[in-house]
Amino acid sequence: MSNIEQTLSIIKPDAVERNLEGQIKEIFIRNGFRIIEEKKIQINKSEAEKFYKVHETKPFYNELCNYLSSGPIVVMKLEKENAIFENRELMGSTNPKDAKEGTIRKKFGLSIDKNSVHGSDSLENANIELDFFFKT
Ligand code: CMP
């Protein structure tokens, strides 16, 4: 049975700043993802706090929100069979040091904060996160 899903991907400020947008999109496309919608934006701190609300009790929450709002990002609605899991596999571990060879974070990530990409971690969060950026 087919299970086409949509998921949210963010190219984070460290990657946009290093002009990696084209290379990262190319990796998604080469791996069978379709970019259904995309936009380059900069969000403010309170928007970042809302986006990362699931992490609000974490010690790194404030830094994380400062970081996501620190520069332009590219948000993308990606579609593929099992897109949520497939995107997480392709991104690699949150900490680039632990990410496997061939993953986006291994290739481009600088640190656990500047890890170049974000991807939704569940169907529920994918729907919430896609609505956050693309709800019309
Ligand atoms: P992301 O997938 O965008 O989701 C939350 C982000 O918090 C994560 O990527 C990391 O960039 C960041 N982060 C910073 N410190 C930590 C940490 N100790 N554990 C997990 N995520 C962290």
Image (cartoon, rainbow, N blue to C red):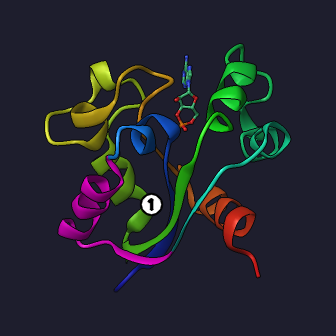
Residue 20 in the image: state x and y as whole percent. Answer: 32, 47
Q: Secondary structure at mark 1?
A: helix
Q: How far from the left and from the top, in percent, is residue 52?
A: 72, 40
For the N terminus, give its image quadrant: bottom left
Q: Nearer the viewer, residue 132 or 44?
A: 44
Q: Which quadrant is the C terminus positioned in?
A: bottom right
Indicate whether 2 appears above or below 56. below
Name the residue at 63% across, 37% down.
Answer: 68
Q: Which residue is mark 1?
A: 84
Q: Which residues are magenta?
A: 20-37
User: Eyeballing the image, is 29 above or below 93?
Assistant: below
Question: In the image, ligand 1 is in what quadrant?
Answer: top right
Determine if the magenta segment contains residue 101. Answer: no
Q: Amino acid at mark 1?
A: Ile
Residue at 23% across, 63% down: 26
Residue 12 percent location from the top left of the image: 50, 42
Answer above or below: position of 16 versus 8.
Answer: above
The extreme bottom residue here reads 1
Asked whether, in this view, residue 50 is left or right of residue 104, the answer is right
Front-most of residues 11 and 126? 11
Q: Is residue 134 left or right of residue 100?
A: right
